[in-house]
Image: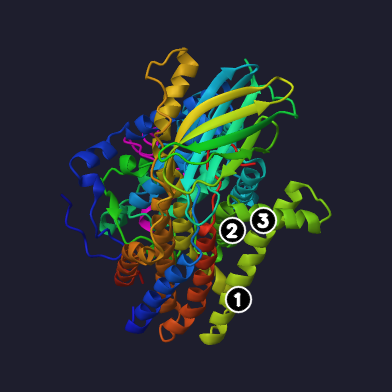
Amino acid sequence: MTTPPSTSHGTFQGTDVLRWPVVGLLLRWRHFRTALQLVLLAVAVVIVVHGFIGPEIASANLATVLTWVHYRGLLVVALLAAGNLFCTGCPIIRVRDWARRLHVPTRHWPKRLGGKWIAIVLFAAVLFTYELFDLWSLPRGTAYLVIAYFVVAMGVDLLFTGASFCKHVCPIGQFNFLTSTVSPLEVQVRSADTCRSCHTADCVSGHRPGGRSTPIVQRGCELGLFLPAKVGNLDCTFCLDCVQACPHDNVALGTRAPGVELADANRRSAIGRLADRPDLVVLVLLFVFGAVMNAFGMITPVYRVEQWLTTMTGGAPEAVVLGILFVAVIVIAPIVVVGGAAVATRIVSADARSPWRITARYVYALVPLGVCLWTAHYAFHLLTGALTVVPVTQSAVIDLMGWPMFGEPLWRWAGMRPGKVFPIQLGFAIFGAVGSIGVAHLISLHDHPKRAVRATMPWAIAIAIITVAAIWVLFQPMEMRGVGFGG
Amino acid sequence: MSVWMRRLVVAGAVTLALGMARAAEAHSGPPYPIISNQAIGNYSVSVWTDPDTTDDGTKAGRFWVTMYRKGGEDVVPAETTSALTLTPTDPPGAALTERSSLLQDASHQYAVLLLDHEGPYHVHVAIAGPLGPVTLESDVQATYDLRPARWLMALYILPFALAGFLWVKLLLRRRRS
C-alpha cells in the first residue's frame, strides 16, 4: 500500500494515507475539500437559521447543540484520531474562495501585525466572553458569533492575500494548529531527493503547467509552508493544496510519532524556530491554562469564588470579577508554575540560558497536556450529549415545517451517563500528563544530554501541578453545556 | 526512558488517580425535558430534569422550570413562583416538595430535590402568580450517576496511563535530531 521510503534525512518513513485504496482516493480527489466544505457550510447555515428562528432554550436549539456540544467534541476527536480535518473543511474558506472570484486581494499582511498576537487576543477574548455571557446558553448569540466569524474572515481575506485570516487571526485555527501537533498524521515530503531536484517549488508557489509565464492552475500552500523545510503540523490546515500542486506526486499524508515536533529545535518553514517565537509561547500558555480556566468557569465552586471576589471588591461588576479570575488563572498561574520550572531547570542543569529562553524551549512540552484537558472537557459534553442532535433536529424540523416530519422529538435520547464518562476524562488528563512529561524529557535529552532527568524534573512537577488542578476541576459538578439554565 | 523515570511516572499517575478519587462527588447528568412547551392557562411551560439518585443525602435531582407568557417568549411577572412535588410510585413513598429558586429571571426557575432511590417518581408542578395558578403533571425515572467506585477508577485509567507510556516510548524512539 505504501511506497518504500527513502532513507535520507527528512524523508517520509511511515504509512502514507494518500496511498490507501479508498481513503487515499477520496483524499486525493480534487474536489474532496470542496465537498467537505459544502457539508460544513450547510451545517453553518442550519446553525444560523435555527439560532434565529428556533427556541431560546439552548438544549432545544441546533445552534447551541451543534456548536458547543458536537462541533467542538468532534473537532478534538478528529484532531486526535487523524489531523486538522476541520480546517480542511472550513466553510469560511469556501465562501472566501467564491468571493475572491469577484475581488482578488493584492495587499500583503502587514509585517508589524505578523505572528499570532491578534489571534492570541481573540482567543483570550473568546474564552472570556464565553464565560461572561454564557455563550453556550444563547442560541441567537451563537448564531451572531458564527456570522461575525464569516464577516471578519471575509474582510481580512478579501483585503490581504493568502490565508492571512487562518495564519494570523483565526482563534479556532490556532487551537487546531496547536492540537494538531499531537495528531498522528502529518503532510510530509515523500522523498527529500525529489525535492532537491525540484526547481519550481509548486507546493508553495502554485502549479503552472506551462512554466513561469503561465497562470497558476492549482494554488500552493497559502500559509507559506515550503514542504521540504516544513516541520510538523503547525500552521498546516490540511488543505492538501500541496498534494494537488506537486508535479512529482511527492507529498504524503503520513503517520508519525504524535508530539515529536514539539521537541524539534530546528528552523521550520514560515515559522522559524519555536524557541524564537514569543507569540507561540504565549499562545501555548493561553491554550494550556485556558483549558483549565474554561472548565473551571463551568463548575459550581467558581460561583462561590465569584461571590467572594464580588464581596472583596465592594460589588464590582461580573466582568471585573471574571477578569480578575482570568488574570489569576491565565497570567499569574503560568508565570508562577512555568517560570518556576524554568528557573529550577536553570539551576539543576546548570543551563546558562535565561529563564525566558528555557521557558521558550520547554513550554511546548505542555501542549499534550493542554490538548488532553480540552479533550477531557469536550468529550464530556460530546459523550453525554451525543444523541441530543436527534430530538433537537426533530424539534427543529417541527419549528421549520410546522409538522413532525421526522416524528415527535425523542427527548430521552441524550448520551452516556456522566458518571461513565468521568473515568475517560480522568484517563485523558493522565494520558496528556504522561505525554507532556515525555516531550519535556525529549527536549532535555536534546538540550541537556548528560543531565536530562534532572532538567526534566521541574517540568514534570509543573505538569503534575497543572494536572492535579485540572483533575480537581473535573471532580466538581459541572454546569451542562447547551442547557441554558446555568444561572 | 530510564527505568527510574518510568517508575516515577507510574507512581505519580497512580498516586494522582487514587488521591483525586477521594474527592469524588456525583456529577450532574444530561438534562432532558419531561414537559415541553406545554400551553396551559396563560403560560407556556417547559420542565427539564436531571434526576440523579444519591444515597449519601446529597440533593441531586435537578429540575429547571421555564415559563413564558402563552403565545410568545415574554418573561412572566417577577412575582411568579413554581414548586415541584415528587412522589415515588414504585415503591410508593412520601412526597417531597421544593419551591423553585429564580435563575436569571422569573421565567427561569430551578429546584433540586433529594432522590434517595432509583425508580419512577410522579412529578407535580404548581405555578402561581399574577397570570394565574396552573398545575402540570409528569413522570420521571431517577437513576444513579453511574460513576465507578473509587477503587475501580484506578483500574479504568490504567489503559490511558499505559497508552501514555507507549506514546513516550514512541517519542523517544523516533526523536528527531
Q: Position of residue A365 (x, y in %)?
A: 47, 67
Amino acid under label 3?
Phe
Category of crowding for the residue at label 2, using alpha-carbon neighbours closer than 10 angstroms: few (below 14), some (14–19), many (at least 20): some
Cα distance in 3D space between marks 2 and 3? 19 Å
Per the rendered image, the range of residues in magenta is A205-229
Chain of the residue under label 2: A
Report crowding for label 3: few under 14, some 14 to 19, many 20 or more residues within 10 A (C-alpha). many
* Figure check: A107 above or below A391: below
Q: Chain of mark 1?
A: A
In the rendered image of this protein, does residue A62 appear above or below residue B70? below
- Residue at x 29%, y 66% (from the top left corner): A9
Write down the residue under mark 2. A279
Label total for image: 3
Considering depth in this image, is B112 or A106 the residue closer to the camera? B112
The amino acid beneath tag 1 is: Gly
Q: Position of residue B54 (x, y in %)?
A: 48, 52
Q: Which mark is residue A326?
A: 3
SS at badge 3: helix
Q: Nearer the viewer, mark 2 or mark 1?
A: 1
Secondary structure mostly seen in magenta is loop
State the CA–CA distance, disc 1 to disc 3: 20 Å
Residue at (35% x, 64% y) in the render: B152
Q: Is residue A365 above or below residue A423?
A: below
Residue A378: image tag: none
